[in-house]
Amino acid sequence: MHEERTDLKGMPLVELEAFLSRWGKERYRARQVSRWIYQRFAGDFAAMTDLSKDFREELSRECRISVPGVEKVETSSDGTEKYLFRLEDGEFVESVLIPEEDRRTLCISSQVGCALKCGFCATGMMGFHRNMTSAEIVHQVCFAVKRLEERGERLTNVVFMGMGEPLENQREVSKTIAILLSQFGFGLSGKRVTVSTAGVVPAMLALAEEFPVSFAVSINAPTDGLRSGLMPVNRKYPLKELVAAMKRIPLRSGRKVTAEYVLLGGVNDSEKDACSLARLLKGARVKVNLIPYNAHEYGDFTSPSEETVDRFRDVLLAAGIQAITRERRGGDIRAACGQLRRAAKSP
């Protein structure tokens, strides 16, 4: 039955307008339906009381609103929450809600697994299963927003930093972003939606032209030799090409591209590495987000010492590059950076 009916969740407004216009429906009907799905979290059409009874029955016959099941909710000692979703084909994905003083940031997944095989990432080690649909991606946001609203809180930021490489699933990610930014969806501003990429250059530039979103680019090494060993994607899009692309991203006033740098103990965390990174990024409007490696049972790397992290950061600051160290969050529930991994077996 599911396969026969059209899922309206995950349809951007323009697509929803075109879909309903084939039934002779006015454009404002799409806005009404969109509000019900993303702002009132309707799971069926019977709840949409400002639509006529006949229209609701017609929608129920031809369409559906998917609601993937939530298998598990875990809460960290620091308030971070991790959600495990069971998708309709039995696959599992995770997303993470990070509470801070005035922010509530949701880290969402865009693929089941990942094909890029970055050596330090638990998701990459599980291999690639499939792309997620826009309905599956956006449902993570629906779940978190509803949960926050029930306790009088509001989602402020969405980051595509969960499982998968978003730009290897560009079409469905683009549809999700359109819903996140729409006033009939979640009404977020572009600066509050961040797409994290390992450096898929053509898709990054295309998405930057389409939406005013923020970008976080995983650098993780200052030289091609080291980066190719850690991140095979570097063989296709080497550092020089990647940094040149980062400089081409159209930036609104005062904004910068984030360069993510996972510090691996004894691998890429020396003062020499910091100096090389400073030279690489010279002239780019970037801020460097230093991420001390979060150890997990699937990897062989170790975390750097606090002194090493501070020294690395200080070298960047001395070179005039903005740099901050990301606070570790959710480590006790394996919700920290690089730790997301399918936590259950699909049938």
Image: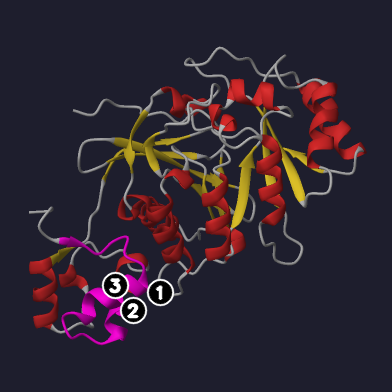
Which residue was labeled with disc 1?
184
Please state the extent of the stretch shown in magenta in the rendering: 6-32
| Relative height, residue 148 to residue 300 (above, below) | below
The circle on residue 267 is: none
The circle on residue 31 is: 2
Residue at 68% of width from left, 22% of height from top?
225
Q: Of the residues under marks 3 and 2, which one precedes in the sequence?
A: 3
CB-based contact (under 8 Å), mark 1 and mark 3: no
Determine if residue 339 is in view.
yes
CB-based contact (under 8 Å), mark 2 and mark 1: yes
Does 256 lie within the magenta span? no
Q: Quadrant of the N terminus?
A: bottom left
Label 3 element class: helix
| Relative height, residue 331 to residue 98 (above, below) | above
Image coordinates of residue 137 in percent, x first then y, are 37, 50
Q: Is residue 228 left or right of 307 when viewed as pictured?
A: left
Image coordinates of residue 134 in percent, x first then y, are 34, 55
Give the crowd class for mark 1: few <14, some 14-19, many >=20 residues within 10 Å. many
Which residue was labeled with disc 3?
16
Q: Given the image, on which type of amino acid does mark 2 rest? A: Arg
Distance, label 1 to label 3, CA atoms, is 12 Å
Image coordinates of residue 222 in percent, x first then y, are 74, 29
Report the colour scheme: secondary structure
Q: Is residue 220 left or right of 2 when viewed as pictured?
A: right
Name the front one of labels 3 and 2. 3
Distance, label 3 to label 2, CA atoms, is 9 Å
Residue at 29% of width from left, 72% of height from top?
16
Residue at 63% of width from left, 56% of height from top?
102
User: Is residue 345 or residue 27 the one in the foreground?
Assistant: 27
Residue at 25% of width from left, 42% of height from top?
87
| Relative height, residue 257 to residue 58 (above, below) | above
Q: Given the image, on which type of amino acid does mark 1 rest? A: Phe
